[in-house]
Amino acid sequence: MTTGRRVVVTGLGAVTPSGLDVAALWEAASTGRSAVVALDAPEFAGLAVRIGGRIVGFDGTGIVDPPLARRLSPSQLWAVGAADQALAHAGVDAVRLRDGAALPWDPARTAILVGTGSGPIDQMQAATRALDARGPRGVPVSLVVHGAPDAAAALLSERYGARGTAHGVTATCASSAIAIGEALRRIRHGYADAVLVVGVEDCLNPVNLASNANLRALASGYEEDPTAASRPFDRGRRGFVMAQGAAALLLEAEDVARERGAAPLATVAGFGEASDAHHPTAPHPAGRGAAQAVAAALADAGQDPDDPASVDHINAHGTGTPAGDAAELAAYAAVFGERARRIPITATKSSTGHLLGASGAVEAVLAIRTLQTGLIPPTINLDDPEFDDWDVVREARPAVLRRVLSPSFGFGGHNGALIFEHPLEAR
């Protein structure tokens, strides 16, 4: 078994409120355009919070056969759309795969991992309403097949003929970041040659909005100006803004990618994960688990946190919750010491909203585009910085970047951290 292989990203895809492909997502994030809108449909009437990042204009027609499309959740169609984009970006024709063409990798060594906190939760909610209204015979059999968090992985495995591992990864808001880390490990240690990772989430429904609002986790009072609601690191922050969507990354062993002529977009240099073991919703005040995950990612990448070259930029988790933002910066201080305050930090959730279990994948895409372009996106709505001795980027900033840290932290104390490296960085 081959071990220790370098792992590269060769394809990216995205279906998000900020844009229906990677180019549109990057343009919105890099220019600081908010995707947060008012939720004015009748089902949201009466909710305490009626704003969010909603996908607009996505056309799932033709992505899958119409009978299957009617049984799937919109989020599963977004997952397929993002996955198809990532494969196409990597030079693999997803349409031909769907029609029976061979994968460019050994199918038994091609894996699918889908990171999601809740899966297609709309299907369970609809089935519950059907049970209440029409009794047991009203519950659709499709709930069994397509209603679980792993369903999108099974769907994509069948779609592309990938016969390696295919399952879901669930760790609340750290789900898809941890899925990328698991993909790194599978390739690095010889269990797979290619892994398609998809992060997907859709909790933008009245039940989940009401629950999070009752927890006082959501930013409230912004119905007149939804774009101002997501305010990471600002004194006026009131909570996060829920969003929906999907993003996909294709990871390959570097030798396999080069053999088939694929150009690496970035190297996945390091991954770390840890648990706070502290509280169901509140982060550890000192960022204990977050710091452990970041330190582990640096060690995995062979980087010394005291070395100024170890990390050039942090795409922060930055949700805009009072406790979360403070704990996150405490974690960076614990790992990097006084240097932490000089590392440029941005919080792209200020533009995209918080895609929950999909956020790690979305922010990995943005971290890779930051490496590629040498442009750090801004943190918008930072009108009154609480942490003004930190370098939180407020306007898009050109920079020479070798490595970007992309962390994700979630309820339940789940913490994951990824380090992406420019593919031309000397080793």
Image (cartoon, grey):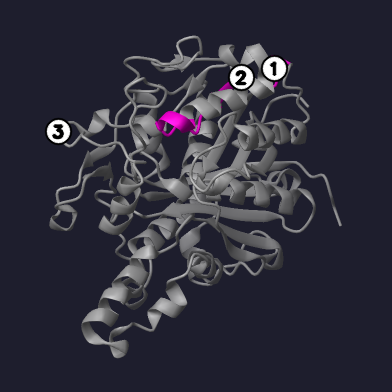
Answer yes or no: do the residues labelled 1 and 2 have beta carbons within 8 Å?
A: yes
In the image, what residue occupies the spot 64% across and 28% down?
422
Identify residue type, mark 3: Glu
Whole-percent x and y of residue 324? 48, 33
Question: Could you tell me what secondary structure mostly forms the magenta stretch?
Answer: loop
* Residue 245 placement, left or right of 392: left
- The kind of residue on which mark 1 rests is Ala
Quadrant for residue 254, please give it.
Answer: top right
Report whether 382 appears left or right of 129.
right
Q: Indicate whether 336 appears above or below 420.
A: above
Residue closer to the observer: 84 or 307:
307
Work out whether residue 365 can be spotted: yes
Residue appearing at x 30%, y 29% in the figure: 33
Residue at (30, 51) in percent of width and height: 209
Q: Nearer the viewer, residue 165 or 239?
A: 239
Q: Which residues are magenta?
A: 307-324
- The percent position of residue 270, horizontal first and vertical second, equals 70, 37
Q: Which residue is mark 3?
A: 224
Residue 143 picture location, percent across and down: 40, 77
Q: CA distance from mark 1 to mark 3?
A: 44 Å
Judging depth in this view, the residue of 235 and 34 nearest the camera is 235
